[in-house]
Image (tube, rainbow, N blue to C red):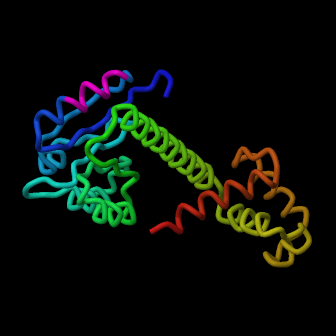
């Protein structure tokens, strides 16, 4: 988290809870933004980088579960820590199955909450880094010609040059030229790295 702005978003309809959480987060030098309702959050949220969302489960009008659903539909990737009362635990477990990162019961210890926040932020940082890596790989793939893309597909499947030439009905020498171009344009230092890059992008594209 070094030299990177971290923002913890706090959504709770209770002003004293918002104040307490804001002061707690300030002790680890993270920025905070507070919202008195789920609607307020949805109306004003702007993606300002790495962070997480502390979300009260029980709120009037739009509950924490309702907001969680809207985060998914709006493709907001903030890890959510759901804050619940004792009787809400079964509901919170359902929320985790729906994508909530973690939940914490009231009353909670400050140390525990801080640890959960730090874990959520670290997850978000890694998620964003992975997404950026995927974007970078896709941009490199877009520099390839259609023929080079065909050669790349066969390379990562383990085809030797002779079989690729037969598959694409071109000479082995031409395959060698295309293969060299692929490695150069993809900035891959080895076939293993090229395979890893291809697998990473394909895995991302397979996600719903």
Q: Tell me which segment is drawn in magenta.
A: 20-27
Name the side, left or right, on which 206 lies relative to 23.
Answer: right
**Magenta stretch holds residue 22:** yes
Magenta: main secondary structure equals: helix
The percent position of residue 62, horizontal first and vertical second, equals 13, 57
Q: Residue furthest left?
A: 61
**Magenta stretch holds residue 63:** no
78 up-or-down from 64: above or below: above
The percent position of residue 207, horizontal first and vertical second, equals 49, 66
Q: Residue at x 75, y 47 (%)?
A: 188
Q: Residue at x 17, y 29 (%)?
A: 19
117 up-or-down from 159: above or below: above
Name the side, left or right, on which 106 lies relative to 4.
Answer: left
Q: How many marks?
A: 0
Looking at the picture, tell me which residue is in the foreground, 5 or 181.
5
Classify residue 11 by image quadrant. Answer: top left
Q: Residue at x 23, y 60 (%)?
A: 87
The percent position of residue 140, horizontal first and vertical second, equals 62, 49
90 up-or-down from 3: above or below: below
Name the side, left or right, on which 186 lies relative to 161.
Answer: left
Looking at the picture, tell me which residue is in the foreground, 15 or 88.
88
């Amino acid at each position: 988290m070094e030299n990177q702005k971290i923002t913890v978003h706090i959504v709770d309809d209770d002003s004293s809870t918002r104040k307490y959480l804001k002061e707690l987060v300030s002790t680890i030098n993270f920025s905070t933004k507070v919202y008195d309702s789920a609607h307020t959050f949805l109306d004003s949220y702007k993606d300002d980088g790495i962070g997480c969302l502390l979300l009260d489960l029980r709120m009037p009008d739009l509950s924490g579960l309702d907001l969680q659903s809207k985060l998914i539909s709006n493709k907001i990737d903030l890890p959510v820590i759901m804050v619940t009362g004792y009787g809400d635990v079964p509901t919170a477990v359902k929320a985790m199955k729906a994508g909530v990162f973690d939940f914490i019961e009231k009353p909670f210890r400050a140390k525990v909450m801080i640890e959960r926040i730090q874990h959520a932020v670290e997850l978000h940082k890694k998620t964003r880094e992975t997404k950026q890596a995927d974007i970078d790989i896709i941009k490199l793939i877009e520099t390839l010609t259609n023929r080079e893309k065909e050669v790349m597909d066969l390379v990562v499947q383990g085809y030797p040059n002779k079989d690729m030439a037969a598959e694409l009905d071109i000479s082995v020498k031409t395959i060698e030229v295309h293969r060299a171009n692929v490695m150069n344009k993809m900035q891959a230092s080895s076939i293993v790295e090229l395979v890893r890059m291809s697998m990473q992008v394909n895995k991302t594209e397979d996600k719903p």
